[in-house]
């Protein structure tokens, strides 16, 4: 039905000639844009409703005093649905530690939350298909679980700033007001509008780039440099991605362009993870609670794990 | 009555403060709105995502998206 609508717009309403490169690109652009925005609206809305049942306060309670491994898995999963922005990283970190959430488990949450979320998954689904979206989600969770477990095993609690352990929260301010289902719907609607406002421009650019370079840049432009045959493709992509910072929506246009032009799947996924999971602003914020050594270890473990994932997928996809 | 808005100073935290002040004014209440920006103190109150709203020692809101003006009034009145 969407296809027919795009067809109608381009050829009947705009009266463009069939079969030209421009009209074909426009039809593709209109179809993709509508499809992806429909997907985004519906899925963000549904996830927002689920999200309203998992405020950070509840997640904290669930993860408190959990054993490692189980705790890491739960934390990575909860990272998907618990709303969190890096500006709240410090109070969240302190709150988790104070509630007895193990350090490695806290990290699993902090890693998974910005990297694996509904926006990333929907955009990958809309542009590359559901298989790629699932693979990204699965590997993102895996990276969060593994990196968190390693940090837990290394017993790095001593490299957390001391003052964090001295903070005691006031028990009086324990619970948020209970929400009626109507309130959750309102929350979900607000949240969906909020997110769409933030990402729409990136999404349009991504779809536009897709159409444009599809026609004008040779298909195998990047194969030589970043195809599966080049053993340095993954580390170079990750090294470039770590200092770059963007949310999942912002990196999608670049990801689309790279993939179209022959960069291999594993390399692209590793690049996207490096961009979304590691960022300078977040490091600066986390520096308030972590000593520099722990930050360095965190970045190191993440880099190595993401490179590993990149190689793994280049080998099997 | 004791109202606190907690946030380190991001755009949403400032918006929240304005919203709460407006709500207090429209409700015609005699209450001071205190802004807490120190990150350690924010954590101490048990706020995990900012901005937070505390009314008479109870967390009434935390995180994004911000509540509407009507909702803020409800949150404040619920404790009055």
Image (cartoon, rainbow, N blue to C red):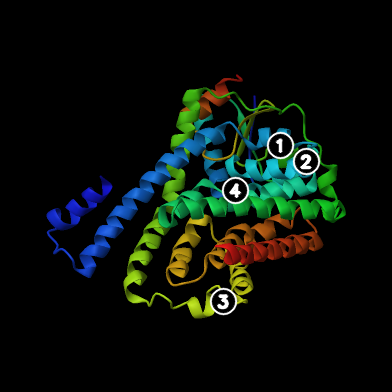
Disc 3/disc 2 C-alpha distance (Å):
43 Å
- Few, some or many residues within 10 Å of mark 3 (<14, 14–19, 20+): few
Residue A98 as seen in the image, left or right of residue A310: right
Secondary structure state at the residue bearing disc 2: loop
User: Which one is earlier in the sequence, the residue at label 3 or at label 2?
Assistant: 2
Quadrant including the N terminus of chain A:
top left
State the CA–CA distance, disc 4 to disc 1: 15 Å
Mark 3 or mark 1, which has the lower sequence index?
1
For residue A275, what is the image quadrant?
bottom right
Q: Residues within 10 Å of mark 4 (few under 14, many from 20)?
A: some
Q: Earlier in the sequence, mark 4 or mark 1?
A: 1
Q: Residue, x 37% and y 76% (percent of image)?
A: A217
Residue B70 appears at what percent x and percent y? 47, 27
Q: Are marks 2 and 1 in contact (CB under 8 Å)?
A: yes
Q: Position of residue A219 (x, y in %)?
A: 39, 74
Please report, as a chain letter, where disc 1 is located.
Answer: A
Do the CB atoms of the residues marked 3 and 2 lie less than 8 Å apart?
A: no
Residue named by callout 4? A85
Label 3, secondary structure: give it: loop
| Rendered image quadrant of residue A290 | bottom right
Q: Chain of mark 2?
A: A
Crowding around mark 1 (Cα neighbors within 10 Å: few <14, some 14 to 19, many 20+) is: many
Residue for badge 3: A229
In whole angstroms, how far apart are the C-alphas of marks 2 and 1?
7 Å
Which residue is the site of mark 1?
Answer: A60
Classify 10 Å Cα crowding around label 2: few (below 14), some (14-19), many (20 and above): many
Chain identifier of the residue bearing label 3 in the image: A
In this orientation, which residue lies closer to the viewer: A284 or A312?
Answer: A312
Please tell me if label 3 and label 2 are on a single chain. yes
How far apart are labels 3 and 1 at the CA level?
44 Å
In the picture of the structure, the residue carrying the numbered disc 2 is A101
Disc nearest the viewer among 4 and 2? 2
């Amino acid at each position: 039905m969407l296809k027919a609508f795009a067809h109608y717009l381009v050829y009947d309403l705009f009266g463009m000639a069939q079969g030209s490169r421009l009209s074909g690109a426009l039809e593709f652009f209109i179809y993709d844009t509508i499809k992806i925005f429909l997907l985004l609206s519906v899925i963000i809305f549904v996830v927002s409703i689920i999200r309203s049942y998992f405020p950070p306060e509840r997640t904290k309670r669930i993860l408190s005093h959990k054993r490692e491994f189980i705790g890491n898995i739960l934390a990575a999963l909860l990272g998907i649905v618990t709303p969190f922005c890096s500006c709240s990283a410090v109070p969240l970190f302190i709150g988790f530690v104070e509630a007895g959430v193990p350090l490695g488990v806290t990290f699993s949450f902090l890693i998974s939350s910005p990297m694996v979320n509904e926006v990333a998954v929907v955009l990958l689904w809309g542009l590359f298909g559901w298989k790629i979206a699932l693979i990204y989600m699965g590997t993102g969770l895996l990276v969060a679980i593994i990196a968190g477990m390693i940090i837990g095993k290394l017993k790095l609690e001593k490299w957390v700033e001391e003052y964090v352990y001295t903070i005691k929260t006031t028990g009086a301010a324990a619970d948020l007001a209970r929400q009626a289902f109507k309130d959750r719907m309102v929350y979900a609607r607000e949240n969906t509008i909020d997110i769409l406002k933030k990402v729409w421009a990136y999404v349009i650019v991504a779809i536009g780039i897709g159409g444009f370079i599809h026609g004008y840049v040779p298909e195998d432009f990047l194969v030589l440099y970043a195809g599966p045959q080049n053993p340095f493709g993954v580390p170079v992509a990750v090294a470039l991605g770590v200092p770059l910072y963007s949310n999942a929506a912002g990196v999608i246009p670049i990801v689309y362009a790279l993939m179209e032009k022959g960069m291999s799947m594993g390399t692209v996924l590793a690049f996207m993870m490096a961009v979304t999971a590691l960022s300078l602003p977040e490091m600066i914020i986390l520096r308030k609670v972590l000593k520099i050594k722990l930050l360095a270890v965190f970045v190191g473990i993440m880099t190595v794990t993401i490179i590993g994932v990149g190689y793994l997928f280049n080998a099997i996809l | 009555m004791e109202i606190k808005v907690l946030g380190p100073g991001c755009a949403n935290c400032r918006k929240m403060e304005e919203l709460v002040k407006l709500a207090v004014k429209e409700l015609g209440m005699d209450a001071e709105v205190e802004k807490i920006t120190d990150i350690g103190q924010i954590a101490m109150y048990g706020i995990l995502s900012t901005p937070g709203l505390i009314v008479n020692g109870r967390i009434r809101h935390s995180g994004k998206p911000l509540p509407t003006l009507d909702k803020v009034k409800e949150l404040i009145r619920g404790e009055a």
